[in-house]
Amino acid sequence: MIVATGFEAGGHRVSFLREPEDCLTGTLSLVPQVVDTVKVPVIAAGGMADGRGVAAALKLGASAAQIGTAFLACEESNAHPLHRAKLFSADAQRTSLTRAFSGRLARSIHNEFIDAFRDQERQLPPYPVQSPGNARVTDETAAVRILAPTHPIFTFPNRITSADFDDWVQERNLYSFGSFDARYTALLESADPGEPPQRGGEVIADVGKGKYVYTSYAWFRQLRAGVPGAYRQFANLISLPKAP
Ligand SMILES: Cc1cc2nc3c(=O)[nH]c(=O)nc-3n(C[C@H](O)[C@H](O)[C@H](O)COP(=O)(O)O)c2cc1C
C-alpha cells in the first residue's frame, strides 16, 4: 500500500525522489492522482481531523485515511501538555514548513524558534546528530587516532599521519558531535586526559551524489598559526571532490 501525504500534513514530509519543497501537493488533488496511477491500496494523509475528512478521502478513492496531528491531543499521546494546549489555541491557526527541528522538512505550529532558524536551515546536518554544545578536546597535544587511514581524506593528495597533529595550538577541536546517525563515518578519535574517546570531531557521510563532512577540528586556529599538518589536512578536505 501507499500513503499519499498532502502538503497539509503535520510533522515530517515524506519525499524520496525530489526535494520535499518540490512535492507540495494538496491531499485533495494528490489522492485521486495516486489512486488512478497505482493498483495497490492508497491511504490518504494530511489535513484530516474528523469523520468529514475521512469520508472525503474514501470518496476520492483512498482505501483508508491516516490521521496524525489530531491524535497528538489524545490521552495516549506522549505530547507535552503545553503542546496539547497549543493545538487548541489561536497559535495553531498558523503553521509553517521548517527544517529547524531535525533537518527534515516538517509542518509545525509557527513559533519564534522557526523564525530564528530560518537562515541556518540549509546548514543543518543531513542526518540526525546530537550535540552537547560544548564537546571539545582542549589539550592541543592530545593524541589523535586516524580511524580510516585509507580514506581519501587521509591520502589525497597528502598522506596524513599522526605527525600532522604535531605543533597544534590551543585545542584539537570544539563543538563536536556527541552522538550521530549510523550513516556518518567517524574519521578521527581524540580525548582530553581522563575523558572517554570522542569520535564526533570529524565525520563524513554520503548524501545523494555528494559527500557531507563535518569537521570541528580547530583549523581556524591552526591555519592562522601556520601549522603545516593543518594545511596538509585542509588541502585534503577541499580536494575530496577530485579524489580518485
Ligand atoms: C509530530 C508529528 C511528527 C511526524 N513525524 C513523521 C515522520 O517522522 N515521518 C513521516 O513519514 N511522517 C511523520 N508525520 C506525519 C504523519 O505520519 C501523518 O502522515 C500526518 O500527520 C497526517 O497529516 P495530519 O497531521 O494533517 O493529520 C508526523 C506527524 C506529526 C504530527
Image: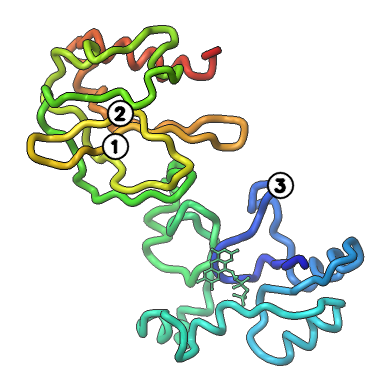
| 3D distance between C-alphas at marks 2 and 1 | 6 Å
> What coloring was used for the rendering?
rainbow
Whether the residue carrying mark 2 lies under 8 Å from ligand 1 is answered with: no
x, y percentage for residue 235?
Answer: 38, 12
Quadrant assignment for ligand 1: bottom right
Q: Which mark is residue 188?
A: 2
Depicted 54 relative to depicted 105: above or below: below
| 3D distance between C-alphas at marks 3 and 2 | 33 Å
Residue annotated with mark 3? 17
Confirm or deny contact between disc 3 and disc 1 (CB under 8 A). Answer: no
Amino acid type assigned to the residue bearing label 2 in the image:
Leu
**105 left or right, relative to 46:** left
**209 left or right, relative to 235:** right
For residue 204, which quarter of the picture? top left
Q: Residue at x 19, y 45 (%)?
A: 134
Q: Which mark is residue 199?
A: 1
Question: For numbered disc 1, what is the local secondary structure?
Answer: loop
